[in-house]
Amino acid sequence: MTKQKNTKKTRALPAKGALKLMVTAERLFGERGIDAISLRQIVSAAGQANSSAVQHHFGTKEGLIQAVYDMRLPQLDLGRQQRLDAAKDSNGYVSVPQLLVAMYMPVVEDFDEIAQKSYALFSSQLLQFDLANHPHMRTTVPQPAYNDIVARLTEHFSYLPEDVLMVRMRFASELFFGALSEWRHLEHMPNTPYPLPEPFWNEVLQAIEALFRLPYTGATYQKNAPAKPK
């Protein structure tokens, strides 16, 4: 994702009814797909009597999607900032592994299991959006820590073309959201190879780092020639 502009506007907390709609929409969008869920289904699942509750709070379905995307950003950015501040050395330098910890681990360490699942599934659905239509491009929620992480990663990988780095950031997000789902499976396995979360997430972050560090050659993919019949 590209850097998001900051705003100094004070953000009011959503009303209780609006928050219920947002949490419900995040879950349903993630589980069934954004196009497959109607506003009426969200209102019903949220236990709201007013059939026009979404229009009242958010205007349109697109407004609701934006609100759902924005909902968790303040907590995420706070967690990212705390980890960035803890990682900086005396010169303000933060290594790539530390940047990845700051980017991704707030979801793992600061969200409960229900929030993790809902956030991951919804965010995975958003990865199908064109970048120009992604809610990230329209959010007004300040994300100074996120912007700082992206700027530092861009500096670390300045030898990569900008569009290639953006593609790899999307790949990294897909890998991370998939890892959240995989961890839920591993937790319930009787003979899991990862009895503790730390080794698992350490390997996930190493895999993401390897994705970023992979040299870009621009070489064209070559299919293997079919085997000749004997």
Image (cartoon, helix red, strand yellow):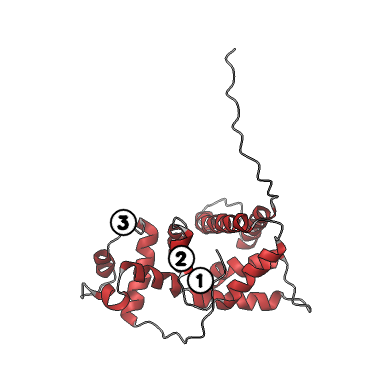
Task: Please tell me which residue lies in front, 88 or 118.
Answer: 88
Q: State the CA–CA distance, disc 1 to disc 3.
A: 26 Å
**Secondary element at tag 3:** loop
The residue indicated by pointer 2 is: 119
Is there a contact, CB below 8 Å, between mark 1 and mark 2?
yes
**Residue drawn at the location 60% of the way across and 62% of the way down:** 197
187 on left or right of 89:
left
Task: Give the label, 3 or 2, closer to the camera.
Answer: 3
Q: Amino acid at mark 3?
A: Ala
- Sequence-wise, the earlier of marks 3 and 2 is 3
Question: Of residues 181 and 99, which is closer to you in this image?
Answer: 99
- The vertical placement of 57 against 154, above or below, is below
Residue drawn 66% across the image and 60% down it: 202
Q: Which residue is label 1 attached to?
A: 111
Q: How many marks?
A: 3
The image quadrant of residue 95 is bottom right
* Structural distance between the alpha carbons of marks 3 and 2: 18 Å
